[in-house]
Amino acid sequence: MRLYVGKIPTIAADMLETLTENGDVEVVEEEWNEVQLDIESVLREYIRVEREVTDKAREVISQRSLDYTQLTKIKQQVAEERGFGVGDSAIDYISRQVIEALFHSHHVAEIFAEDHELRRKMRDVLRRHLNVDQELDLEVRKRIKNLQEGTSAWEIEYRKVMEDLRRAKKLEE
């Protein structure tokens, strides 16, 4: 699961539309953009913290002279220490953070649905948007399978091939 900066407005708009169309969340029409910005800020913060966690995991790997194939495992450990969701738990983490933001937003008129119902709907939206990224990731990995994951050569080639694919599919970061 990977969240790209370029997809944040689309995801936030879709999430807000999903939550308001059945009356789960009530937003005054004039405040719609502000609520969308509230959701976007949660998504942007997720990306910022996720980068910090990744950097910390790389630092730990470097300090302990571990193999870079351990990056995912170390990243998971660092995230757990911070109470942050990565990998499979990222969607639940993000949805909880969005709910918290909606409850504290001065731009939301009323929230009628239970938290678990809001989380379910947001999970569906996030999965729908983030599955595209998983498909891209699989395609990139297939193209660079001759390189060892975690090495600097793998990282460079991964980014290059991912950029090429995103450009070809007209996706922005």
Image: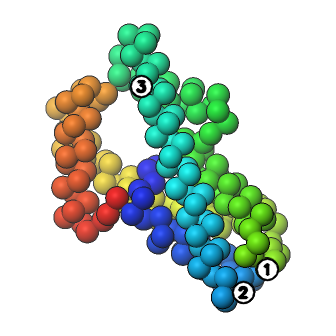
How far across and down, in percent of the image, does residue 102 sit? 73, 66
Against 28, residue 155 (above or below) is: above
Q: Could you tell me the amino acid type at mark 1? A: Ala
In this picture, is 88 found above or below 126? above
Q: Is residue 14 above or below residue 75?
A: below
Q: Which residue is mark 1?
A: 109
Q: Disc 1 to disc 2, how far (Cα)?
A: 6 Å
For the residue marked with disc 2, what is the amino acid? Val
Tell me the kind of residue under disc 3: Arg
Q: State the SS at label 1.
A: strand
First in sequence, mark 1 or 2: give its number.
2
3D distance between C-alphas at marks 3 and 1: 43 Å
Q: Residues within 10 Å of mark 2 (few under 14, many from 20)?
A: few
Seen in the picture, residue 78 relative to 62 is either above or below; the reply is below
Mark number, residue 2:
none
Note whether residue 72 is visible.
Answer: no
Tell me if 44 is positioned left or right of 20 in this view.
Answer: left
- Cα gap from disc 2 to disc 3, whole angstroms: 45 Å
Which residue, given by chain and number where applicable, does mark 3 sit on?
58
Asked whether, in this view, residue 162 is left or right of residue 38, the answer is left
The answer to which of marks 2 and 3 sits earlier in the sequence is 2
Which residue is at 54% across, 42% downward?
49
Q: Secondary structure at mark 2?
A: loop
Q: Which residue is mark 2?
A: 28
Rendered residue at 46%/40% (across/down): 51
Do tag 1 and tag 2 residues touch (Cβ < 8 Å)?
Answer: yes
The x, y position of residue 170, in whole percent, is: 25, 68
> Label 1 neighbourhood size at 10 Å, few (<14), some (14-19), many (20+)?
few
Q: Residue at x 78, y 65 (%)?
A: 103
Q: Residue furthest bottom?
A: 29
